[in-house]
């Protein structure tokens, strides 16, 4: 059965409203009948360094731990790929049957400026 977990720094720093939003997304998506990795959107933003921040709830519905070592991530809005970057994140490990929130940072220049970044889709290839 799928479980929601928070990385230690998230668990300490997460605002009550954000935790409730993540728990709500988890409740709505934890029973999806898929056998892979699914990223449910939480929020998107541009920070002060003009980096695109994409926060998602990563669902690992597989039998293996997900680790990102030279993993290619695509972020698309309305079917158009606007960010494509390879990530190596040794601190991120999502165990089998676990869902965990995470924010991926696409630095300025690594994404196509867009009028809106909302309702996008993040894929881990």
Image (cartoon, grey):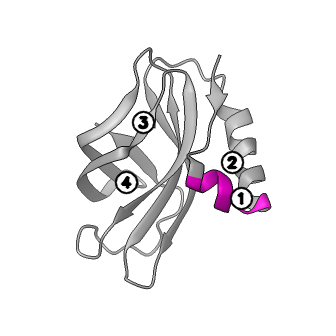
Query: Is 115 located above or below residue 120 in the figure?
Result: below
The residue where tag 3 is placed is 93
Give the alpha-carbon distance from disc 1 to disc 2, as whole Å. Answer: 6 Å
Give neighbour class at mark 4: few <14, some 14-19, many 20+ (Cα, 10 Å).
some
Residue in the picture at 31% in, 49% down: 74
* Dot 3: element: strand
Q: Quadrant of the N terminus?
A: top right
Give the alpha-carbon distance from disc 4 to disc 3, as whole Å. Answer: 24 Å
Residue in the picture at 44% in, 48% down: 121
Q: Which residues are magenta?
A: 9-16
Q: Quadrant of the C terminus?
A: top left
Q: From the viewer's perspective, tell me whether residue 56 is left or right of residue 104.
A: right
In the rendered structure, does residue 12 fall within the stretch colored magenta? Answer: yes
Give neighbour class at mark 1: few <14, some 14-19, many 20+ (Cα, 10 Å).
few
The residue where tag 2 is placed is 22
Residue in the picture at 57% in, 17% down: 33
The residue where tag 4 is placed is 76
Choose mark 2 or mark 4, whichever is in front.
2
Q: Tags 1 and 2 in contact by the CB under 8 Å rule? A: yes
Number of numbered discs on residues: 4
* Dot 2: element: helix
The residue where tag 1 is placed is 18
* Dot 1: element: helix
């Amino acid at each position: 059965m799928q479980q929601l977990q928070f990385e230690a720094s998230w668990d300490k720093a997460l605002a009550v409203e954000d935790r409730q939003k993540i728990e709500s997304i988890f409740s709505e998506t934890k029973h999806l009948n898929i056998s892979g990795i699914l990223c449910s959107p939480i929020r998107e933003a541009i920070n002060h360094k003009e980096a695109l921040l994409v926060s998602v709830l990563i669902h690992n519905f597989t039998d293996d731990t997900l680790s990102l070592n030279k993993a290619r991530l695509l972020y698309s809005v309305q079917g158009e790929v606007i960010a494509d970057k390879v990530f190596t994140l040794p601190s991120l490990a999502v165990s089998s049957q676990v869902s965990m929130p995470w924010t991926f940072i696409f630095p300025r220049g690594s994404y196509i400026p867009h009028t809106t970044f909302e309702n996008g889709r993040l894929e881990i290839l």
